[in-house]
Structures are given as structure tokens and as C-alpha cells.
Image: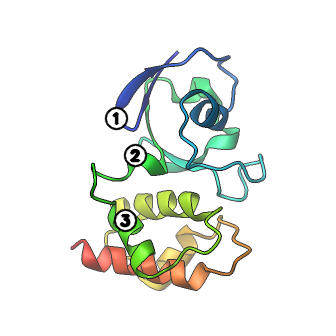
Amino acid sequence: MELTVNGTSRDVDAHPDTPLLDVLRGDLGLTGSRFGCGLGQCGACFVLVDGRAVPACDTPLWSVEGRSVTTVEGLADGDRLHPVQQAVLDEQAAQCGFCVSGIVVSAAALLAENPQPDEATVAAALDRHLCRCGIQHRMIAAVVRAGRESR
């Protein structure tokens, strides 16, 4: 099966029903997306598929063939971080880091759709993400900052 991941065409030898997350982490070595609940409910595994944030743990491989998959590793432009990635660093919004990659991916999708969201819009967009460290307020501030600074 041929996939386009982070702008590169990749041949993958896996059963079509294999979860995308397993292929990204195991076959392609892209470990930024994390396994959390395995049910698509916690947000740790989110990736972009054609620009839309989706849980990779319950997305079958067959459903992304011919589509563009972007992981947190693919958001940066060379050495230049995506505005959300930079804002997370600037705001010191990450704590343990387990959920951060999924949040960053969802925030990037939000900013692509709405470049200047307010706090309520960001909170609603990140609602599916579970974080036990309590960084939600700092993460919301980081996403608002990313929108403001990427004007």
C-alpha cells in the first residue's frame, strides 16, 4: 500500500485494516503520535488526514490510501517550527508531553481553518484531548498566541 506521510510517498507492507498509528510508529518510525486509549477518545494519537485532525489509533490503513497524512513531525518546515509548536515552547505549555503532539496537530488544523481563534473556539477545538497534567489553560494561550503571531 502506498501512503503519503509528511509529504513523502511511502510504501507500506501491512494489512489494510491495521490501525494507522501502528504503521506510523512501528513501520515508519514516527513516534510523535502516541497510543493512549486505543478508542480514538483521548487525542494522544491525532494526525492530520487531508488537513483534518483524526485519531490514528482507530483509523484503518485502507482509509488513508491516496490521502495526505501529516504527523506532528511533519508540521515543521525544515528547521522552522510550526507556529503552534513554537508557541507551545514560548508559553511553556507542555508538561509531561504525552498528549501534546495530538493537541498540537488539532491546533494546527484549527488555525488552518480559523487563523485567529478566540479562547472559547480553541477550547472547543481541543475538547477531545485528555490531559492529566492540567496544561489546558496554557495550551489554549499557546494556540491563541500562535494565531496572533502568524498573522
**Circle 3 is placed at which residue position?**
111
- Above/below status of 48 relative to 108: above
Amino acid found under the numbered disc labelled 3: Leu
Q: Position of residue 98 (x, y in %)?
A: 65, 62
* Residue at screen point 46% across, 65% down: 107
**Badge 3 or badge 1: first in the primary sequence:** 1
- Above/below status of 52 relative to 3: below
Q: Which residue lies furthest to the left in this view?
A: 151
User: Distance from label 3 to label 2 (Cα)?
Assistant: 16 Å
User: For the residue labelled by badge 1, is the local secondary structure a helix, a strand or a loop?
Assistant: loop
User: For the residue labelled by badge 2, is the local secondary structure a helix, a strand or a loop?
Assistant: helix
**Circle 1 is placed at which residue position?**
7
> Observer-nearest residue: 70 or 117?
70
Q: Which of marks 3 and 2 is in front?
A: 2
User: For the residue labelled by badge 3, is the local secondary structure a helix, a strand or a loop?
Assistant: helix
* Residue at screen point 36% across, 29% down: 8
Q: Do the residues labelled 1 and 2 touch (CB within 8 Å)?
A: yes
**Circle 2 is placed at which residue position?**
74
Amino acid found under the numbered disc labelled 1: Gly
